[in-house]
Amino acid sequence: MLLFLLRRIGAGIALVWVAATLVFFLTTLTGSDPARRILGPQAGPDEIAAKTRELGLDRPVLERYWDWFTSALRGDLGASWFTNQPVSRLVADALPVSLSLVLAAIVLTAAVSIVLGVVAAVRGGWLDSLLQGVSIVAFAVPNFLIGMVLALVFAVQLGIFPALGYTPFGEDPGRWLASITLPAVALAIGAIATVATQTRGSMIDVLQQDYVRTLRSRGLPTRSVLLKHALRNAAPASLTVLSLQFIALISGAVVIEKVFGLNGLGERATAAAGQGDVPLVLGIVVLAVVVVVAVNLLLDLALGWLNPKVRLA
């Protein structure tokens, strides 16, 4: 197991390096002039040339890449070209917002989808048909449209939740929960539909297995059969889909943050990409890939705990 973890960690580090390297060199192909963007159209040629030298853009690409890479290994991601603030600070300030939103959405997705999937598989009938119909609609409707409807109804008309802004957890837990409720629900709707459908299918397959019939014939309570045996064996497939949805939620949070005025990583990534702020874009990419690698590693550990065959493999 230890060797397996070391291999996955090594593969994750390689993935982070490849992603950051690709983004670095792709940003050099845009043809934009960061110095002119920073100084504005009124700047003269001498000012632009001086700013270009200050940013190090007059040096060869490989030399700039090596300087950035060696600095990143020491934990220095550079400074924003437009604000001169350290990239690590800008990312750290925005990270709690995005993490709060994505984690709340994934917890909501896991809780609701498991319940819906199990109930649909066990009860069947109109509940099963209703789940499949609602899942198709929820998956098809864009989450930003759902977010605008939720904001209009529950924030503007009913005044239950705030329509815009984010309150840090340490400042006021109650207001923090209120500020992320609508964005998390809007972000989770599509994921709930996907994971619930997968859970339903996995549960139906497991409930048709011979060992489940044997457990029922021995008089075990239905709840015990469902939760301790059937759900555990159906969990790996659902957990895999849930991890993929977590990664999708990270990208989907970009739009939701715009809708609800949350200054998270998505908002900063969009602004940095529009400005051509390469150091900030690279910092956000590195962090996003690290999160994805960590989620995949946790998924492997969870699958090993649920399925002994995985541990033996």
Image (cartoon, rainbow, N blue to C red):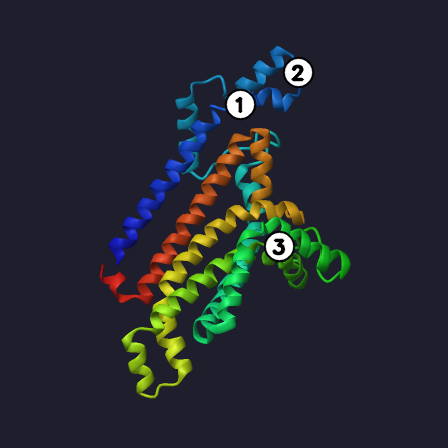
Position of 167 with respect to 28 (left or right) is right
Comparing labels 2 and 1, the label whose residue is closer to the camera: 2
Label 2 SS: loop
| Residue 55 marker | 1
Quadrant in which residue 206 is drawn? bottom left
Q: Nearer the viewer, residue 236 or 311?
A: 236
Note whether residue 65 is visible. yes
**Identity, as a three-letter code, of the amino acid under mark 2:** Ala
Q: Nearer the viewer, residue 1 or 249?
A: 249
Q: Are marks 2 and 1 in contact (CB under 8 Å)?
A: no
Comparing labels 1 and 3, the label whose residue is closer to the camera: 3
Task: Residue 59: give x, y in percent of width and height.
Answer: 45, 18
Q: Residues within 10 Å of mark 1 (few under 14, many from 20)?
A: some
Q: Residue beneath label 2, please?
A: 43
Q: CA distance from mark 2 to mark 1?
A: 16 Å
**Identity, as a three-letter code, of the amino acid under mark 1:** Leu
Label 3 SS: helix
In the displayed structure, 140 sits above or below 311; it is above
Q: Are marks 2 and 3 in contact (CB under 8 Å)?
A: no
Q: Residues within 10 Å of mark 2 (few under 14, many from 20)?
A: few
Q: CA distance from mark 2 to mark 3?
A: 41 Å
| Residue 277 marker | none
| Residue 183 marker | 3
